Image: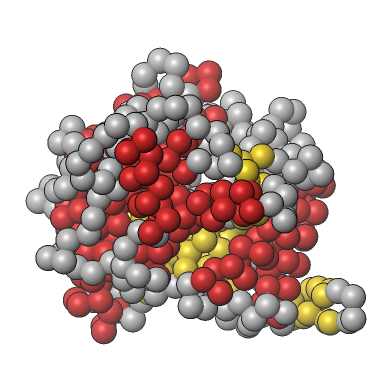
Amino acid sequence: MFPREFAWGAATAAYQIEGGWQADGKGPNIWDIFCHEKGRVFEEHNGDVACNSYELWEKDLECIQQLGLTHYRLSLSWARLLPDGTTPHVNQKGVQYYNKVIDDLLACNVSPMVTLYHFDLPQALQDQGGWKSPDIATLFDSYAKFCFQTFGDRVKLWITINEPYVCAKFGHEDGIHAPGLKEPGTAAYLVGHNMLRAHAMAWHSYNSFYRTKQKGAVSLAINSDWHEPLHAGCTEDIAATERYFAFTLGWFAWPVFVTGDYPELMRSSIDAQSKKMGCSGSSRLPSFSKDEPAILGTADFFALNYYTSRKVKPGGGCGKMCMVCDQDAEVVLDPSWPICGVSWLAVVPHGLRKLLKYIKDTFNNPAVYITENGFSQVGPLQIEDVQRSGFYKDTILEVAKAIQEDEVNVRGYFAWSLLDNFEWADGFSVRFGLFHVDFADAKRSRTIYQSGRDQQKKRCHLTCHIEKNPSKTQLSYCRHAA
């Protein structure tokens, strides 16, 4: 049985839905700049207006209510609150906007989960070095303390940084996300390091100054696929899978949940590749300073973004200094897995259950919130999205099995996303929403998908009962008057 207090939610992010990129004193962020550079995003799409949630928040709230959600995950735009990224310059219109969002949610008995950073660094801070600068950790801590002080009396679930792996690798190694840097083999490790430093400082600030009174919980959202050897009995494939886990999930979870440092396998692999390339000196993977707040233990729960699974084998290197060569592991799709929309997104609900069990066994059985999980649609619009609806049914069943049979402490599930939105380099060409947004309509009309209709609870409390029989776990949905 899902616990009665289980969090049923949907997630969004500020840049992907808000629009209002120059409204009411907001400063520019790195995605504003990135999208305005020609050739960066599919068909030159941008988030200048997006879903226009800055002006249409009440419409979003109606969608949330229609689905009957208990929780809603949103992110704050750092540059909307602090236009130059620093606390001496506060934009009160931004504060008023988020106060209204939070207050409206609570008035509707919906609990907010608030993300401080979801890819959109103020451009003013990027101009000072961005996440490559060691100073960014202190600047982020100041921003976090401002948010805790301003909103923490009402927000009880916080995410400091969303998907540091994506920020580091896609934005600083591959150059396909803002700020669009291509500095392989070095910048991503430095950025990831500074993000962990920033997260730890913010967690310690909350723990020292706000936790006793506000009684909230703080974590960071780590994205991970489920990985397994291409050939189950192959020693080389097993070793490659271990390396791949070390360079993805382990990169950020190991320091926070296990040792306070990076996986030894990650560091030894990087150093071995450096030696092979004839590079001497200190490791390209930075080390944590004993003079700064400890990394270990800086998460009150495990926030997991899961989308797909991969088979792993050795290889994939290019003979250059880069992350792919460092990890010496190549991922492939199992041809039996169906693809939804974008080519990378294989539909593997059972992979989520396996990953949840892995997290339980590897990271000391933490409380887990699944903070993102979804199914994409491309091409012609299909409001009757039968496949997506089936995906959610199958996935929730796997989560139920993880809770009931594997005894994983899963506390909540957030679908990505509430709305079709700006999907980063794919622009508006990829749709993940439970509601369709018509981007050709100036009013940005919202229309519920079948998958949304199937999830809605309409002022009723959803209780999922798991009935076990010898062969499988079954779900039945019982609706009770609220």
Vertical arrangement, residue 244 with respect to residue 178, above or below: below
Q: Is 82 left or right of 16, judged from the image as shown?
A: left
Vertical arrangement, residue 401 with respect to residue 124, above or below: below
Q: Residue drawn at (52%, 61%), measured in percent from left and top? A: 304
Place residue 463 in its image quadrant: bottom right
| Camera-side residue of 153 and 346 | 346
Vertical arrangement, residue 69 with respect to residue 453, above or below: below
In the picture, which quadrant includes the N terminus?
bottom right
| Camera-side residue of 381 and 373 | 373
Looking at this view, name the residue that lies furthest to the right: 470
Q: Residue drawn at (26%, 46%), measured in percent from left and top? A: 283
Tell me where residue 237 appears, x and y as whole percent. Answer: 63, 49
In the picture, which quadrant includes the C terminus?
bottom right
Tell me where residue 204 appears, x and y as whole percent. Answer: 23, 71
| Camera-side residue of 432 and 479 | 432
Tell me where residue 466 appears, x and y as whole percent. Answer: 78, 79
Vertical arrangement, residue 393 with respect to residue 402, above or below: above
Q: Residue drawn at (23%, 69%), measured in percent from left and top? A: 294
Tell me where residue 212 appears, x and y as whole percent. Answer: 26, 84
Q: Residue drawn at (23%, 55%), measured in percent from left and top? A: 287
